[in-house]
Amino acid sequence: MDAKAKADTFAGTFVSKSKLAPELVDTPFFGTPNVEMCQFLPFRSRIARRLFKNLDTSKATGPDRISAAILKRLYKVLAVPFTRVCRRLFNSGCWPNTWRTHLIVPIFKRGSAFQPGNYRGVHLTSVLSKIAEKVIGNPLVPYLQATAFGPNQWGFSTGVGAKDLVTMLVMSWTLAVCSDRKVGAYLSDISGAFDRVSKTYLLSKLYAAGVGPMYLNF
């Protein structure tokens, strides 16, 4: 038996005794396939490397007490193993229990400071959990931008934001006034509109947009 056959036999024995499924090795990128959100989901270590490198050291830590300053200094050695962890979590459809724990800090909104209802809770999440969300969600956002987001989508879109929306509205209003047209505006308080999201409705929208079952299961 040659060396290669011995290595294959050893690898097969190791995998059979392991409790976890064999790890899926990432593949090179060869363009934009039609099954991108179903079968082709590349997780890149360079994405994790950039996220670790660009961490804001002033951000508060989560329950694990691992500060962003430490992770930022170790970005070169953490990128590759952390990407492998993210890939394993995604393929297994699980999330660590440690990252499910949050510290809730009350932030004052307005009104009387003695009324509990005038505070909103802010979740202090583990920094590693936030980076894992971005690594795993990195292929999802461009796909939704190309297939699901419409021309009126200003949030979660690369290159546009609230300032661009305000600029566009002011210019359109100015053009309307100069053209002897009336401008109507409707103002509404939506401060609590995004506190709760229906998981069932969100999953159905993602399914209708063509997101594959692995993402939905995760």
Image (cartoon, grey):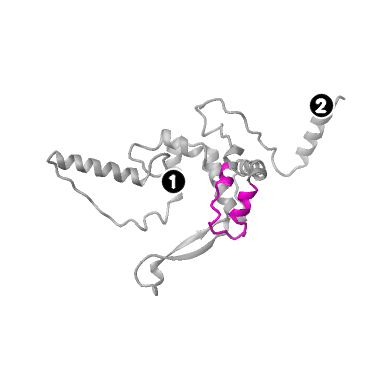
Task: Tell me which residue sits at (46%, 63%) in the image.
Answer: 121
Circle 1 — which element? helix
Task: Tell me which residue sits at (65%, 43%) in the image.
Answer: 76
Q: Quadrant of the C terminus?
A: top right
Main SS of residues in magenta: loop
For disc 2, the marked residue is 4
Q: Is residue 210 left or right of residue 192?
A: right
Image coords of residue 82 (percent x, y): 64, 44
5 within the magenta span: no
* Highlighted magenta segment, given as a residue range: 50-74
Q: Quadrant of the N terminus?
A: top right
Q: Is residue 111 above or below residue 167?
A: below
Task: Tell me which residue sits at (34%, 69%) in the image.
Answer: 111
Q: Is residue 120 left or right of residue 8?
A: left
Mark 2: give few (<14), some (14-19) or many (20+) Cα within 10 Å: few
Question: What separation in Å lies between label 2 and label 1 (alpha carbons)?
Answer: 48 Å
Residue at the right extreme, as displayed: 1
Q: Nearer the viewer, residue 93 or 54?
A: 54
Given the image, on which type of amino acid does mark 1 rest? Leu
